[in-house]
Image (spheres, helix red, strand yellow):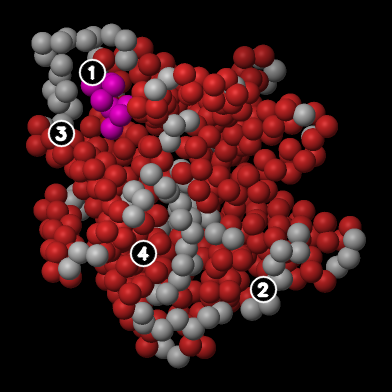
Amino acid sequence: MLFNSFSFFIFFPVVTLLYFILPFRYRWFHLLLASCIFYCAFVPAYIIILFFTIIIDYFAGILIDREKGRKRKWWLVASLISNIGVLAVFKYYNFFIDNVNALLHLSHLSAGSLPILRILLPIGLSFHTFQAMSYTIEVYRGNYPPERHFGIYALYVMFFPQLVAGPIERPQNILPQLHEEHKPNPSLIGSGLRLMAWGYFKKMVIADHLGMYVDKVYDTPGQFGGFPTLIALVFFAFQIYCDFSGYTDIAIGSARVMGYDLMKNFDRPFISKNMTEFWRRWHISLSTWFNDYLFTPLVIAKRNWGKGAVVFALLITFFISGFWHGAGWTFLIFGLLHGIAIIFEFLTKKFRLQLSTRIPAFLYGPGSQLLTFAYLCFTWIFFRSQNIHVVLTTIKNCFRGYDWRHPGFTTNIVNRYDFYVSIFFTLSLILLEFLLFSRNGRQKFLQFNLGVRLACYILLCLVILCFGLFNHSRFIYFQF
């Protein structure tokens, strides 16, 4: 069930109302049932796969806590293998088979080909797999006791606001909340609804309008020259941000309405002055997951290597991060490009610090932000392109076909109305995030009288109704 579908606009109020009406002891079952309905709206059969891993991880957590010595580790390994195995079969099997078949064909070692599985990737598989893995790892490390209530544990994995595209939660944050009784809180309900409206604005008004331009350029890259291609690169940066952070806002907001607190996942990433800072602000739940469960353990394991340990850990982490995003060479290169940039920043930290003292702050800061954004736009070519051929064509197009008299911003791409709507509301987003999410910006806004704030909320809703695209387009990160 999509957040931007009419069915969700009915589903969510009904689920929330029943949640607060029902006695506390039945609420977990109500939310679990609602989450099952929410997930089954996509491909019902795949809920069996989800419960398969839930059952294994539930018992693995209990057995990890009960056993001693090596047996604890073996139960953790069994849990991780089951989760990674399901992910490997559905997400990566065909990628590996395609490449093996290509090698066999080139080497003439086989006349036939290995079989390809004709299956769809379960929605949000990478997200709830990582969330399930964090549970058994935390139990193994002794940071959290195993959950004995099977229904509560199943709800931890399946909680519908963040089931499909995160945030990727830890058991320490969510499980205690699932055991608490949440009463209707007008402050939380108002805050949650405001955040949901902001998410819908970003998704339906900005991301979906930008997507019309981006899709046409990337679907037929050979037809467009420099100006349209460069615009598409910038548009996609804001499209993916508004699409993904919009989903996160709706997820956090809908959970907040019911009294639950999900972790922050974005923090104005486009003000980052380098790639290291970017990953502290972008998809925070994923970057902290990799930091805690992959990067830090690798650095500790190779600590005798000195700086080499950090370089090695960064390469491995971002290689796997790229592969997490998608089963394709474009995603692997995307991850490596980010890793290489952060390794460069790590190795040149002292030099860049000295450079910052020699260049005026009013030039160094904005210049660093502009360079970081430009590099992001370049790396997202690999993220957005269907294959390497499209990547190379898009990069080549950036350097050809400039007509300064007739830039061709909208010719054969989208109509002028949609183009200028995209520009206007993207600039509005930049201004609003600068004003409202800067230091003390939100507090200052909340100090306005109720009438002014209500007028702003009503205006936001009217903008969504008048300019939003109600075409039920999927969120970009649903493919992961």
Label 2's element?
loop
User: x and y percent of residue 333 in the render?
Assistant: 53, 26
Q: Residue 228: within the magenta?
A: yes
Q: In 3D space, how far apart are the residues under numbered discs 4 and 3 (Cα atoms)?
A: 29 Å
Which one is earlier in the sequence, the residue at label 4 or at label 1? 1
What's the residue type where badge 2 is placed? Glu
User: For mark 3, what is the residue?
Assistant: 419
What's the residue type where badge 1 is placed? Phe
Label 4's element?
helix
Horizontal side of residue 131 vs 220, given as left or right: right
User: x and y percent of residue 86 in the render?
Assistant: 62, 51
Could you tell me if residue 118 is visible in this image? no
Badge number at residue 147? 2
- Tell me which segment is drawn in magenta: 227-235
User: For mark 1, what is the residue?
Assistant: 227
Badge number at residue 253? 4
Q: In 3D space, how far apart are the residues under numbered discs 2 and 3 (Cα atoms)?
A: 51 Å
What's the residue type where badge 3 is placed? Phe
Q: Nearer the viewer, mark 4 or mark 1?
A: 4
Residue at x 32%, y 15% (from the top left corner): 398
Image quarter of the N terminus: bottom left
Q: Nearer the viewer, mark 4 or mark 3?
A: 4
